């Protein structure tokens, strides 16, 4: 490992450099700006994949590609980076989605309040911070990225979104900041306790695992982190900012927001809540599982009731985040691995849904389902791609999402049969919300307006969406590509929290 | 050849991929490629079958492990195919009937601008159906299970511009998903109880399982079977599925996919054998559906819906058969295969009639077609004789055995199957008479003509199967002996002797057929359906109010619920979390007024953050 590249710093640096170049040289030509942006995004993606290839999934060390630089020694905080299987796959997800989003959303930044240059710069800055938040192994550094990422995202929503964009952006910011503040309080609490127990305060994630914290204190500290993560993920009832934000943001920004940024919440649950506050997790688990179940069903029912395509997709995510969190708090290897895989799959399938919805919306000039109908007749390829994205969202076997959803359900069932049975109703509701939307937008005779405005996918759009659909299908049949990387990390988490999988209740197997 | 069995799936899958990705460029030869891929799969299946015949009974079951699909903790699912007597029988049925229907579709879909896409979906279906029957575990079966559901969705909604087709497609998928809850729960129960999900291991573990566990698994699997096989109470989608092109109805909604529930229960036989409650439930569901489907069949004027009711009913027989245990498995599967021949043949016949009648499906506009469409008449007639169970046609052998086994279970079960046989004879005779006999009631401008060779040849081949298939399988193929190693077999005990039962059955069939003949061939059939009919006819025409029930109990309240939740989420949940909606509204409004609102609010909250930090440090530090 000594000779390995400092992958993680490079991954944070590359998009930052791209953004800086565009900013410093004040490139005027809009296409030039976008090309530079895409170039740096692709370089970052290539580097992330190279890192993933070099990741040793047989290693038992908690973190790989570890880097540590002094930052504020007085606070016991350092610029410490490293990845485990889960953060590695999330970084790869982010790095693949950014070029896809930039290519797919080539034109979505035109004619907005902000300029194309701002859009590309902000997207690259967001990417750098997303990688940072997953790579940070110092809890304070994590917090800094966690908060800082709100700024580019806030501007992306507010200046490039729809009619109610500023309202949505402020709502997103306020929710996130409230969560962040609560987390900050807990963070300081952790630091103080570490100072008492170790003599010197630290924010080092691995060191903090050795703290001995009593149950009551754990509960309070847990709440600060949990609410921050539950807002981010988002879980019911903290979800109401998401439909507004994702509905108003451009499809590209909505993809990054829901597909990657929201994963910080569920990632944080596995990374921080489980190892640092195991007693509190046990204490709050029943409540959280109820929140997950409500989210699964409530989100799906609300998705069925939406008339706006983007809000519909946002509500499907509320349902899906319920599944992810359910898998996490089921405390089984199937549940946790399933949740980790779910994060990746949900990223890709949400990207496909939002981006193709974006293609539709930009053609027709409307987000409302009622303005469509009969698209399959005028643009069969577009309709087919949208159907595939929808099938991925409803977790059709053969698509990657099926594997993760089933792992979550099975992993939950072995420990909590009744919640798992309740969650299973989500699979019927998912079929309803996706197929109703497909029926209303794609089938029937196209209206005059649809006929005149909705054309077939162009080459740029095909280039953007093809890799996403290919990944969804490949991971559907070869999920071990991700699971092999994730499983050892999950095994470590299980040992850390002292959980073991329930044994088969019967038979000699 | 067994080692190459993966080709069974790979060939049609490749066909579908080429046709879908190739797009318009493949229009000219797409139908030929699709048919070739299906025939190729049939050839591989046949070679595998012949190789299996040469082996001794013990060596016939082989598993081909392709790769590890999902491995997490002890949850271990391979992509592996199980080639045994049961799966190979299905492979031959699927690829054999499937290839005939591909050939038929070349003619039937000739003038459709999307013919290439149609063949792509047919290939996709064949691939998925083969995954379903070849899988060696419940998870991989699940892939085929929903894969055929997807193909069915795409093909029911093939004429996507028709709103009725789009609605029917969605309904089929959603109702099937209700059934899939059962499959999901069954797999979860198996893994939780036994720690395994392959057929072999689950059946082995079932031997030492508790009755309660087996009962739950059995009921969950039954729910799955109800969805896919259109059994009560999840039957309503099948009649609507007739919106799809007729070859689809023949292949998917008669011969193969809808029988998957029967296959699933037969595969899980060890579970059911220790769960008498689940077995009884299977029998009850099968019995109810066989009567429901037959009753619906008596009142339909749409030839395809009549056949769809009949399919429900015939699958009811099969489900009832597998519910009987080892006395019934083999004959249920036997009936599944003969039904595959005669029902596919009759659907293709119906398609041929529609082809000659300007796509009119109303039998009241038919009549006397035996003069205009001789081949269709004869081939359909063979299917007719087979389904009502006239010896020596195929259905006689298989249905008769189910009736016999049903009587060995209980007299009530036996009587239900007998009544079903009588009603079947009635509605099939009605269909036969309204279509091919009586006076011509053709609409203006309709000039019935026989269909082209690509359509009639497959019909002829299937009619040969309808005529001789039963005897071949029973006497030459020795199907009891063939399938016994997989599902087990016992001779039925008790119940009336065959020498009594066969004449009784035939008498009941003859009475049913006579009633149909007298009413629909001897009397004039009104061109418009009479409205002054009994409540029973009205109920049968309305599919025994299955849809009305679904609408009242699920759809309307569901719509109301989603609408109110949207309101609640916007008005209350949002407000609840915001503390008070008004406060946040005011804050937001204030922030919006300032152009640089974001920096200010951020700065404000940072200040707030610092204050909090200071306070916490101070308090904790003092403590």
Image (cartoon, coloured by chain):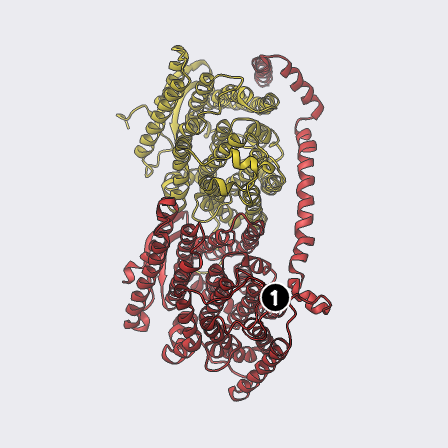
Chain colours: A yellow, B red
The answer to whether residue A353 of the structure is visible from this angle is: yes
Secondary structure category for the residue under label 1: loop
**Chain to which mark 1 belongs:** B
CA neighbours of label 1 inside 10 A, class few (<14), some (14 to 19), many (20+): many
In this rendering, the answer to whether B68 lies above or below A455 is below
Please tell me which residue lies in front, B391 or A484: B391
Q: Answer with left or right where residue B35 lies relative to residue A283.
A: left
In this rendering, the answer to whether A417 lies above or below A136 is below
Which quadrant does the C terminus of chain A fall into? Answer: bottom left
Q: Residue B562, percent across and down?
A: 66, 42
Q: Residue B408, percent across and down?
A: 55, 80
Q: Quadrant of residue B109?
A: bottom left
The answer to whether residue A273 of the structure is visible from this angle is: no
Please tell me which residue lies in front, B514 or A399: B514
Q: Residue at x 53, y 68 (%)?
A: B315
Residue marked by disc 1: B301
Q: Residue at x 42, y 67 (%)?
A: B456
User: Which residue is at the far front?
Assistant: B445
Q: Residue A293, percent across and down?
A: 59, 42
Q: Residue at x 60, y 32 (%)?
A: A239
Q: Residue B451, percent across and down?
A: 44, 65
Q: Quadrant of residue B526?
A: bottom right
């Amino acid at each position: 490992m000594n000779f390995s590249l400092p992958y993680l710093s490079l991954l944070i640096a590359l998009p930052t450099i791209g953004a800086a170049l565009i900013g410093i040289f004040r490139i005027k030509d809009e296409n030039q700006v976008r090309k530079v942006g895409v170039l740096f995004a692709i370089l970052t993606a290539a580097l992330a994949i190279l890192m993933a290839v070099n990741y040793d999934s047989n290693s038992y060390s908690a973190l790989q590609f570890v880097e540590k630089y002094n930052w504020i020694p007085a606070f016991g905080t350092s610029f410490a980076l490293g990845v485990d299987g889960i953060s590695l796959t999330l970084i790869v997800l982010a790095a693949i989605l950014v070029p896809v989003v930039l290519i797919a959303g080539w034109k979505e930044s035109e004619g907005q309040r902000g300029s194309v240059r701002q859009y590309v710069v902000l997207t690259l800055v967001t990417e750098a911070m997303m990688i940072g938040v997953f790579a940070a192994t110092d809890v304070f550094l994590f917090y800094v990225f966690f908060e800082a990422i709100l700024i580019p995202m806030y501007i992306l929503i507010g200046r490039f979104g729809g009619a109610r964009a500023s309202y949505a952006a402020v709502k997103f910011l306020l929710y996130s900041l409230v969560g962040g503040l609560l987390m900050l309080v807990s963070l300081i609490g952790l630091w103080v306790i570490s100072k008492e127990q170790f003599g010197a305060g630290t924010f080092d994630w691995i060191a903090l695992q050795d703290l001995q914290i009593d149950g009551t204190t754990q509960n309070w500290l847990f709440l600060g982190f949990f609410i921050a993560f539950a807002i981010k993920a988002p879980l019911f009832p903290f979800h109401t900012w998401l439909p507004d934000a994702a509905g108003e943001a451009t499809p590209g920004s909505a993809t990054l927001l829901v597909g990657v940024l929201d994963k910080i919440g569920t990632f944080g649950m596995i990374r921080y809540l489980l190892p640092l506050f195991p007693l509190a997790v046990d204490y709050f688990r029943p409540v959280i599982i109820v929140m997950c179940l409500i989210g699964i069903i409530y989100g799906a029912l609300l998705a069925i009731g939406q008339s706006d395509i983007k809000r519909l997709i946002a509500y499907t995510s509320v349902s899906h985040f319920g599944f992810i969190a359910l898998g996490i708090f089921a405390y089984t290897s199937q549940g946790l691995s399933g949740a980790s895989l779910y994060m990746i799959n949900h990223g890709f399938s949400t990207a496909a849904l939002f981006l193709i919805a974006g293609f539709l919306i930009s053609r027709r000039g409307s987000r409302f389902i009622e303005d469509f109908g009969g698209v399959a007749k005028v643009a069969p390829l577009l309709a087919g791609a949208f159907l595939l994205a929808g099938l991925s969202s409803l977790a059709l076997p053969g698509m990657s999402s099926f594997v993760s959803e089933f792992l979550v359900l099975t992993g939950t069932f072995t420990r909590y049969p009744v919640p798992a049975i309740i969650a299973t109703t989500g699979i019927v509701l998912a079929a309803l919300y996706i197929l109703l939307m497909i029926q209303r937008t794609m089938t029937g005779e196209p209206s005059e307006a649809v006929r005149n405005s909705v054309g077939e996918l162009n080459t740029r759009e095909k280039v953007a969406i093809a890799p996403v659909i290919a990944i969804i299908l490949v991971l559907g049949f070869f999920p071990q590509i991700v699971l092999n990387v994730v499983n050892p990390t999950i095994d470590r988490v299980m040992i850390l929290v002292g959980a073991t999988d329930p044994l088969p209740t019967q038979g000699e197997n | 050849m067994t080692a190459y069995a993966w080709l069974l799936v790979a060939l049609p899958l490749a066909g579908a991929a080429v046709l879908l990705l190739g797009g318009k460029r493949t229009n000219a030869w797409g139908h030929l490629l699709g048919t070739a891929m299906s025939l190729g799969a049939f050839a591989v299946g046949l070679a595998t079958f012949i190789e299996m015949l040469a082996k001794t009974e013990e060596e016939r079951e082989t598993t081909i492990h392709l790769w590890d699909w999902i491995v997490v903790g002890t949850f271990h699912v391979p992509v592996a195919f199980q080639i045994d007597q049961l799966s190979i029988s299905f492979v031959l049925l699927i690829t054999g009937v499937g290839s005939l229907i591909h050939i038929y579709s070349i003619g039937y879909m000739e003038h459709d601008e999307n013919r290439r896409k149609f063949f792509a979906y047919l290939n996709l279906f064949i691939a998925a159906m083969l995954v379903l029957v070849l899988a060696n575990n419940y998870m991989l079966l699940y892939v085929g299970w929903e894969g055929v559901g997807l193909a069915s969705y795409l093909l029911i909604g093939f004429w996507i511009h028709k709103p009725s087709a789009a609605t029917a497609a969605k309904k089929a998928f959603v109702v099937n998903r209700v059934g899939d809850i059962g499959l999901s729960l069954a797999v979860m129960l198996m893994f939780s109880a036994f720690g395994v999900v392959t057929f072999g291991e689950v059946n082995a573990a079932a031997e030492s399982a508790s009755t309660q566990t087996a009962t739950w698994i059995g009921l969950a699997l039954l729910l799955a079977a109800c969805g896919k096989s259109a059994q009560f109470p999840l039957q309503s989608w099948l009649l609507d599925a007739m919106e799809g092109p007729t070859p689809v109805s023949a292949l998917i909604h008669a011969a193969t996919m809808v029988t998957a529930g029967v296959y699933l229960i037969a595969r899980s036989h060890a579970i059911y054998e220790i769960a008498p409650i689940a077995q009884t439930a299977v029998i009850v569901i099968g019995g109810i559906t066989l009567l429901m489907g037959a009753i619906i069949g008596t009142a339909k004027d749409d030839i395809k819906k009549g056949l769809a009711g009949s399919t429900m009913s015939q699958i009811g027989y099969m489900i009832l058969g597998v519910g009987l245990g080892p006395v019934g498995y083999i004959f249920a599967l036997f009936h599944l295969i003969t039904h595959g021949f005669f029902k596919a043949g009759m659907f293709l016949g119906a398609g041929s009639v529609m082809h000659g009648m300007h796509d009119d499906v109303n039998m009241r506009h038919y009549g006397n077609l035996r003069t205009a469409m001789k081949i269709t008449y004869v081939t359909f007639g063979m299917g007719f004789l087979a389904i009502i169970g006239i010896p020596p046609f195929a259905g006689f052998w298989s249905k008769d055995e189910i009736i016999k086994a049903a009587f060995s279970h209980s007299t009530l079960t036996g009587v239900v199957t007998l009544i079903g046989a009588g009603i079947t004879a009635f509605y099939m005779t009605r269909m036969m008479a309204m279509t091919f006999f009586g006076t011509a009631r053709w609409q203006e401008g309709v000039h019935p003509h026989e269909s082209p060779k690509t359509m009639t040849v497959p019909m002829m081949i299937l009619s040969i199967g309808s005529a001789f298939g039963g005897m071949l399988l029973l006497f030459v193929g020795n199907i009891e002996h063939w399938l016994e190693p997989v599902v087990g077999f016992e001779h039925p005990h008790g119940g009336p002797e065959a020498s009594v039962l066969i004449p009784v059955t035939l008498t009941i069939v003859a009475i049913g057929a006579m009633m149909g003949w007298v009413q629909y061939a001897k009397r004039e059939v009104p061109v418009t359906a009479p409205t002054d009919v009994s409540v029973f006819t009205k109920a049968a025409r309305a599919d025994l109010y299955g849809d009305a029930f679904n609408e009242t109990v699920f759809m309307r309240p569901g719509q109301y619920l989603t609408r109110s939740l949207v309101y609640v989420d916007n008005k209350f949940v949002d407000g609840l979390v915001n503390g008070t909606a008004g406060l946040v509204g005011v804050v937001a409004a204030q922030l919006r007024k300032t152009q640089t609102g974001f920096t200010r609010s951020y700065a404000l909250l940072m200040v707030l953050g610092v204050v909090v930090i200071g306070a916490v440090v101070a308090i904790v530090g003092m403590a």
